[in-house]
Image (cartoon, helix red, strand yellow):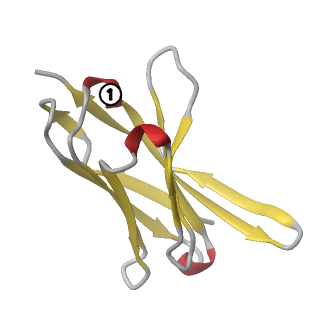
Amino acid sequence: QVQLVESGGGLVQPGGSLRLSCAFSGSIFNIYTMGWYRQAPGKQRELVAGITGTGRTNYADSVKGRFAISRDNAKNTVYLQMNSLKPEDTAVYYCNAKRWTVAGLIDEKWGQGTQVTVSS
């Protein structure tokens, strides 16, 4: 059973940086596509960034050039480096793991979420 544990959230001033981490356990890490999602109060959860097992990445337009997703397959961990943070980045950030096969999505897990607040 896949388990995800996020860490690294907190309060930061506009223009600051934070790095989120997500520790993966319970299966083979590099066969999962990993992603970071966020949900602000009153809004739907949205994809922030994703990374495949081979390192291919994609980003929401709102974070391109400011955020970077990476993974360390030896440490079973995915990271989200967030720079030039803005108040509108304030949200609960969730780690997500998806396993895709030719049959489609066969497994998906979510972390518990970590709060990121950008405020002066």
Residue name at image x 10 percent, y 21 percent: 120
Task: Tell me if 2 is positioned left or right of 13 in this view.
Answer: right
Question: Mark 1 sits on what residue?
Answer: 90
* Location of residue 53 by image quarter: bottom right
**Amino acid type indicated by mark 1:** Thr
Q: Look at the picture and state if 64 lies above or below 44.
A: below
**Image coordinates for residue 39, horizontal then vertical, percent:** 48, 30
Q: Residue at x 17, y 22 (%)?
A: 119
Question: What residue appears at the point 53 percent right and 71 percent down from the top-left corner?
Answer: 56
Going by the image, does 83 lie left or right of 99?
Answer: left
The answer to whether residue 78 is above or below residue 20 is: below
Mark 1 Cα shell of 10 Å, populated few (<14), some (14-19), many (≥20): many
Q: Which percent across, then down, holds residue 35?
A: 52, 55
Whether 11 is drawn above or below 84: the answer is above
Please indicate, yes or no, whether residue 78 appears anywhere in the rendered image.
Answer: no
Q: Is residue 7 visible?
A: yes
Relative to 4, residue 76 above or below: below
Instruction: Classify the position of the N terminus by image quarter.
Output: bottom right
* Secondary structure state at the residue bearing disc 1: loop
Q: Nearer the viewer, residue 108 or 49?
A: 49
